[in-house]
Amino acid sequence: MKRVMAGLASVIMVCFVGLLQGCPYGAYGIYDDERLMDTIADDKALATAIKTDLMKAHFGDSFSVSVYCYYGNVFLVGEAPQNVRAKAVAIARTFKPRSVTPHWFTPDRNERGNLALAADLRTSLIGTRGLSSTRIDTEVNAGRVVLLGIVHDDAEKQLAIGVARKIKGVISVTSYLMLPQKPAQPASQ
């Protein structure tokens, strides 16, 4: 019973900290994605469906492809042999997204591990004033960083890119950060 209560207290504390968005004591703030909830749900469903089909096609066996989706725009990021890249894009296109953008890493190594570099990047993004790191996804591969997500404006986009470039061991930064899009207006009668 004590373990259950301790676990519940931890969950409540994490939720409470999330509510402290504007408070200087809130480490992360609440998730403040500017997309409508329906758009977020549609994007997550599309990314999940594509990832499921990639796994059915054995894309997870010997290489890794992450799938991201924002406003119906799909991003495939990861390592995949030349001979299967087109197939991955074709699978994504069967779902009729607005666009499919592949970002393929060629196998490479660096002095720092991807995990350590990714942790330093995430820590820096979280600690940067004026930047909402909860809306920014990251991929790290041998010092090569990819930033994806939704930012408030171009200043926030440039801030995130600058933060990533300053991390020790980062050799390149590619940004697929997007600005918020307005929902489609119904046709006037």
Image (spheres, rainbow, N blue to C red):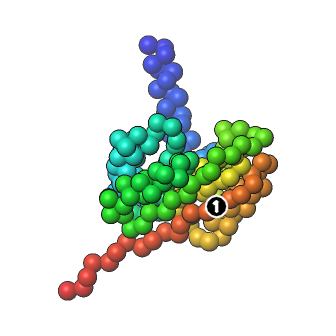
Is any atom of residue 110 visible in this view?
Answer: yes
The residue that appears at 66% across and 70% down in the rendered structure is 155
**Which residue is more in the foreground, 134 or 89?**
89
**Which residue is more in the foreground, 88 or 47?**
88
Q: Mark 1: few, some, or many residues within 10 Å (few <14, many ≥20)? A: some
Is any atom of residue 33 visible in this view?
Answer: no
The residue furthest bottom is: 189
Quadrant showing the C terminus: bottom left
Residue 50 vs residue 14: left or right?
Answer: left
The residue furthest front is: 83
Task: Say what amino acid the circle numbered 1 marks.
Answer: Thr
Give the image location of residue 21, x and y in percent.
Answer: 57, 51
The residue that appears at 45% across and 19% down in the rendered structure is 4
Quadrant showing the N terminus: top left
Give the image location of residue 107, x and y in percent.
Answer: 64, 46
The residue that appears at 62% across and 51% down in the rendered structure is 106
From the viewer's perspective, is residue 188 above or below residue 38?
below
Give the image location of residue 122, x and y in percent.
Answer: 65, 46
**Which residue is more in the foreground, 106 or 160?**
106
The residue that appears at 44% across and 63% down in the rendered structure is 100
Tell me the residue that label 1 is attached to: 174
- Secondary structure beneath label 1: strand
The residue furthest left is: 189
